[in-house]
Image: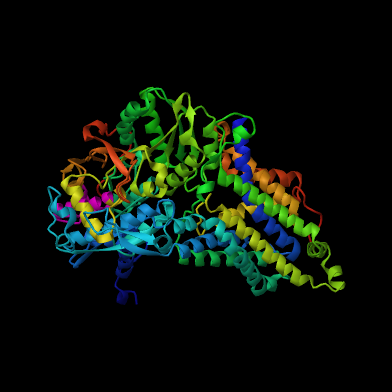
Amino acid sequence: MSETRDTISVPGSLPSVSRRGVLKGSLAVGAALGMPTILTRPAWAQSGFRNDPGSGATVTFGFNVPQTGAYADEGADELRAFELAVKHINGEGDGGLLKTMKPLALRGNGVLGKKVQFVTGDTQTKADAARASAKRMIEKDGVIMFSGGSSSAVAVAQQALAQEMGVVFMNGLTHSNDTTGKDRRRYGFRHFFNAYMSGVALAPVLKEELGADRRAYHLTADYTWGWTQEESLKNATEAMGWETVATVRTPLGAGDFSQYITPVLNSGADVLILNHYGKDMVNSLTQAVQFGLRDKMVNGKKFEIVVPLYSRLMAQGAGENIKGILGTKNWNWSLQDEASLTFVKSFGQAYGFPPSQAAQTCYVQTLLYADACERAGTFHPPAVIKALEDFQFDGTGDGPTLYRGADHQCFKRVLVVRGKMNPTSQFDLLEVVKEVPADVVTYDPNMFGGELGPYEV
Amino acid sequence: MDALLLQVLNGLDKGGAYALIALGLTLVFGTLGVVNFAHGALFMLGAFCTVTLQKILGTSVRVRDESVTFFEAYKEVPYLVLWFGDAGKAVLQWVVPLSILLAIPVMMLIGLVMERGLIRHFYKRPHAEQILVTFGLAIVLQEIIKAMFGANPIPQVVPPIFSGSAEIGEWLGLGPGVSYPWWRLIYLAFSLSVVGAVFAFLQRTTYGMTVRAGMADRETVGLLGIDIENRFTLVFGLAAVVAGLAGVMYTPVLPPDYHMGMDFLVLSFVVVVVGGMGSLGGAVAAGFLLGIVQSFASMTFIKEILPGIDQIIIYLIAVGILLARPRGLMGRKGVMET
């Protein structure tokens, strides 16, 4: 019987070994050895990278913006800019910055011959919601790249996800030093400026306009962006002789800031620095004005309010209260360079109003990613990342710009702006006081620490 | 001294909102025995009465903005401004006080419909079920508002006459420089007046006295031939109006969004528990007390010692009071204990 089962009997040996047994054993061992790979190897591994569009006619981008929450106005404008960028990349509309950006490999026929389509998500201005939304885009919608803002906490969370999943994340509006500092990631890139640059650009103007002998009180949004802006402004203003009276943290989306403003009145401070953004800034500034802060005289000086990170949307929300207040911006629609004029015209024709700085950064980021793919000749993320690192370009409205490879931070001019006293139109709310050149705001990439991580994940 | 005065005023402001919501919450609990978790939504609906009136009065036409020359820009011009010029503009600036007139009947109607249509079917059901159904109702109302008005806060303006600050320092002989926004002072006066009016209604009118008698002993009042159920329904409507008015007047302080009711409900529920379930005086006292405590906890020197204390102080106080007085500040024996 055993002969018919192909048993191999070895004289003198103890157990008999059958051929079938050997085969079964080999299969079991093979399966056991192969198991970890089967379990851990992602579905995209065969094609080389996640969400490889392969030979398909389209490629999908994901735009994850705050459609609700304190930064929803910025989110809505970012979405408009993304849509416009996709149109221009696909060769529709007037071409926008494809006409001015240099160098540029894009030809207005999509990216690497594929038409770009996109999906959108709502970050709700919350890191966990943003992460869930981005994950859905990557896993279900198959996006090759995702982008969006605002809120640095949201940006940092999405960058980490990007690194985990091997999909490039092009940051929208995020201003925390941490985004390209201690929380930098190989798969995350930031075009927007940061809090350190705001401090360096703003401090000399503050000294010139408000004097070197001032006492500042900070109200700060209690998360990564607020903390780093407070630190940067504190360092920059103290270096020029100002004293910091207090730094008070306020919850994001608090709505009513009155309980934090009343202590300012009798603190002895003569400057209030609002490290708030979006609706928080509109509310806190409006309430500060309601409490009569701007009419006060303290220490023999007129009480002043400073908003280190400005936006036109915030200026619109704050109305009259914004007049005369100093701050910084990444970009402003009133700039007169060819690229800015082109972009404003293109955006204005499409939507009936000029773009915000959030819109500009998101538009440029989309173009930069698409251009990097075109230059790399592939969507393979490590190659695209390498194409973006240390890329120098111009013609996007920011002047000559470097995408520094060491921390994935863009270095370009920073604008110091002031709420305009006599606006000439409903959009003409801010005037550019000073354009601070890129070399003045450039810093050592190791200043904020952080590790980019590997190219291959 | 100045700082303390401002923090007290600020606390009273917040406390005013807490007290008005908690007053309705505890009134409904005391009369109908229902824990109404949709009460915060009534505050929110009141605020959206203002938004609705603003939208109606602000109906506008889109016209070309000639001041922008490099692309076709447009601006919205309300018909009221187009037809009546400055008079139309003034009406739009008075939308918050005007919406009180809208909110009273609308909120009364919403309250009555809510009570007749849903809440009364849960009178004899356990508290847990009442909480579940009213919480569900709150979510439904919230989502309806979100679908109608979007998810973002909609700012409201203060009438020009009430904008700016009052020099309270000079009133009190503290010298110049101590000022407080007019509208917040008005809100405080308004909340005190509404609390006073509700108490006067319950204490001084026969109707109110019957309601109070019904709160104390529903069966006996019923045996006397009084239809106490109907009166309680009206009390529910009254509670809805109080919460709604609190919402209307709060809109210039906090731009309304669909979620504001839930934010206030949690705090107001804590206020009711701290004040003592079913105690009207307790709710008002606890409302103002917790508002002031929260305001003081936000003072710089306190936050320096205990960072983040302003976020949790109300809950810490609630825990402390409930440990010392398990029925709350003015809670009576037997309420929610059977």
Q: Position of residue A314 (x, y in %)?
A: 38, 47
Is most of the magenta stretch helix, strand or loop? helix
Pick the front one: B218 or A235 = B218
Q: Position of residue A88 (x, y in %)?
A: 19, 59
Task: Determine if the magenta segment contains residue A361.
Answer: yes
User: Along the horizontal axis of the image, is B170 left or right of B34?
Assistant: left
User: Along the horizontal axis of the image, is B314 left or right of A207?
Assistant: right
Q: Position of residue B243 (x, y in %)?
A: 63, 58
- The answer to whether one can see residue A29 in this image is no
Q: Position of residue B128 (x, y in %)?
A: 67, 64
Q: How is the image coloured?
A: rainbow
Q: In the picture shown, does residue B253 fall above or below A402? A: below
Q: In the picture shown, does residue A347 fall above or below A336? A: below
Q: Quadrant of residue B175?
A: top right
Looking at the rendered structure, the number of numbered marks drawn on it comes to 0
Residue for point 79% across, 70% down: B228
Q: In the picture shown, does residue B222 fall above or below A302? A: below
Task: Determine if the magenta segment contains residue B218.
Answer: no
The quadrant of the image that shows the N terminus of chain A is bottom left
User: Along the horizontal axis of the image, is B290 left or right of A72?
Assistant: right
Pick the front one: B335 or B247 = B247
User: Along the horizontal axis of the image, is A264 left or right of B84?
Assistant: right
Q: Quadrant of residue B278?
A: bottom right
Write down the region rendered in magenta.
Answer: A360-385
Pick the front one: A452 or A105 = A105
Pick the front one: A383 or B227 = B227
- The answer to whether one can see residue A221 in this image is yes
